[in-house]
Image: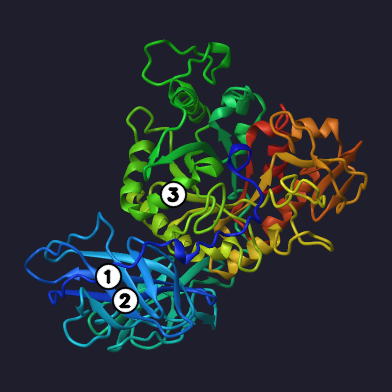
Amino acid sequence: MRFRHRVAAGIATLVLPFAGLVGLANPAQAATSATATYVKTQDWGSGFEGKWTVKNTGTTSLSSWTVEWDFPAGTSVTSAWDADVTSSGTHWTAKNKSWNGTLAPGASVTFGFNGAGSGSPANCKLNGGSCDGGSTNPGDNPPSAPGTPSASDITNTSVKLSWSAATDDKGVKNYDVLRDGAKVATVTATSYTDTGLTAGTDYSYTVQARDTADQLGPVSGARAVRTTGGTTEPPTGDKVKLGYFTEWGVYGRNYHVKNLVTSGTASKITHINYAFGNVKNGQCTVDDTYAAYDKAYTADQSVSGQADTWDQPLRGNFNQLRQLKAKYPHIKVLYSFGGWTYSGGFGQAAQNAAAFARSCKQVVEDPRWADVFDGIDIDWEYPNACGLTCDTSGPAAFRTLMQALRSEFGPNYLVTAAITADGSNGGKIDAADYGGAAQYLDWYNVMTYDYFGAFNAQGPTAPHSPLTSYPGIPQAGFNSADAIAKLKAKGVPSKKLLLGIGFYGRGWTGVTQSAPGGTATGAAPGTYEAGIEDYKVLKNSCPATGTIAGTAYAHCGSNWWSYDTPATINSKMAWAKSQGLGGAFYWEFSGDTANGELASAVDAGLK
C-alpha cells in the first residue's frame, strides 16, 4: 500500500552473497542414532528450494548436529535458513544454530536453502556417520512433486486431469488429487476424472505423491479449471467491493468512519480492510492503540450520533466500525496486517507460522472487539523479494503462512492477502508460491497501481495504474492485464482475484511534454507527500487531458499526473467482469470526494 507503506512495483529482488554466510564448522562425533533426509520442495527453473530434516531416532538426546553432502559441479546453495551453511569446493556443510541443536529422542528439526543448478545431494553424512545408518546417500526421501496437472474433456460436471509422474528413491505408491486444497481421490495412475462438479464454476487442482513408506511429497503446481455451462460470469451483485480504511487517517486527513456514511459510500461497499496492524517479533499486534480503541468521539463525529463516555470499554475506530456494521449489516470488516512499513516482520513470522497465526487470532478475537472483525488480511510487501526491506524467506514461506492462518481461523473467517502486481518475467509474482497459497485464501487484492511514479525522478512520465501495456511503456509486465494473466496461469481462480484501484494520482514536475514518456526534474508537489495527491484534489487542480492504457493523465503547467476517474474506473470494472474477477478494491477511502464519486463508480461498474 502507499504513503508510508510502498513504492514502485519494480524494485529488484536482493541477492545475498554466499560469502556472507557463517564459516565452516568441524563435524561433531558420529551419531548413528539419527537420520538426515532431503527433499527438493520447489523448482522454478532458474533455481530451487531444498529442505533437510534431521531426526533423533535414538533413546538419548542429541546435543548438536552437522550435515554434510556433495553437490555436482554447477549446483550450489545461494542462501540458507535455520542452519549455518558453508562450502569447500563442491562439498557442503550445514551446522545447527545455537537454538536448534538439541534434539530429544524422537524429535526432528528442519533447515532449508535456496539453490542454483539442478543437481541433487550425494555422499550425505550426519555428525560424521551415515545419514540413514547404512549407505552414504540420503535416507528414504519423500517423493518429488508431480508435474502440474493438465485438464481435458471438461464438461458441465466433470474434468479429466493428467500429470507427469513423481520420482522417489524407493518407489511411488499413489497420488492424492486435491480440489481447492481438499483431497478428493487417491489413485495409482497419473490421471483422474473428477465428477459431480457444478456447471460454470472455477476449481483449482493439485496433485501430491506418496511413496511406499507413506511419505507425502510436495504439492504440484495448480491447474485452474472452469466447468462449462452455467452463466458466463458470476451473477450480478455478487462482486466484492472493498475499500481500505487507514488507522492514521483520523489525524491529519481528518477522515473518520462516519465519512463512509455521509459520503454515501457505506451503501456501495461490501468489505472494509482496516489498515494496518503491525508485525513484531513474529506476532500480530495493534499498532496505534489510541486511534484503534481509545480515541473519544463526540456525538456529531459518531456514526450512531452518541458521544463516547470516559468509562466505556471500547472507543476509537473499532467502536465506530461496530456502529457502522449495526447500521449497514451487509458490511464485513477485515483487520489488515503489514503494509509497506510493517512487512519486515513477516520473514520472522514465517519461521513459526502456527505461532504467528495464533497471535493474529488473539488480536482479531480480542473480547473487547471480537464482533467487529470478520477476517484477516495479510499485506506482505514482498515475500522472498524486496519492499522497504528485503527478505530471503523462500518461495514457500508465503504459502506456509497462509496455510497456518486458514488452519487457525477456520472456514468461518475471511482470510485474504494484498499481493504484488509485478507481472514481469522473473518478477515479484514469480518469487513466491501465490498459486499454491490460493487454496487457503478467499481472495487476493492485486495491487495494480504504483507501477510508475516520481520515485524515478527524471521519468519517463507514465500512468501509475495502467490496465494494459502500450507502446513505450517503461517496463514490460508492469500493467494490470499482465499481472492478472500471470496469476491465472499459476492456478489462481479468477474469482479469487480483485482488481486494485488507486484513489490518488502520482505525478512529476519539470515536464514540458503533454503525452506520456516525457522527462521530468522531480516529484510534483503533494498535500501530504511529494509526487502523490488525492483524486479529490486533482480533479479540480489538474483535470485530466488524456487517457493512456485505461488510465487518465493530466498536464498542467509543468506538472504531469496520472490517476483514475469515474470514466476510467467504469472501463476497468467492465474489464474485470469480462475476466471473471471476483470484484475490485481501492486504496483508500479518504482520497475520494465528499460524495464518494469514485466508490460510486466502482459500485456501478460491477453491477
Question: Could you say which is closer to the camera, residue 394 or residue 496?
Answer: 394
Question: Could you say which is closer to the camera, residue 508 or residue 470?
Answer: 508
Is residue 330 among the parts visible in the rendering? no
Is residue 310 placed above or below 292 in the rendered structure?
A: above
Q: Which mark is residue 53?
A: 1
Disc 1 to disc 2, C-alpha distance: 6 Å
**Residue at image point 67% right, 57% down:** 577
Question: Could you say which is closer to the camera, residue 211 or residue 593?
Answer: 211
Q: Which mark is residue 346?
A: 3
Residue 420 falls left or right of residue 412: right
Earlier along the polypeptide chain: callout 3 or callout 1? 1
Residue 71: percent from the left, percent from the top?
39, 82
Amino acid type, callout 3: Phe
Residue 76: percent from the left, percent from the top?
45, 76
Q: Which mark is residue 38?
A: 2
- The count of marks equals 3
Pointers 2 and 3 in contact (C-beta within 8 Å)? no
Amino acid type, callout 2: Tyr
Earlier along the polypeptide chain: callout 2 or callout 3? 2
Amino acid type, callout 1: Thr
Is residue 588 placed above or below 166 in the rendered structure?
A: above
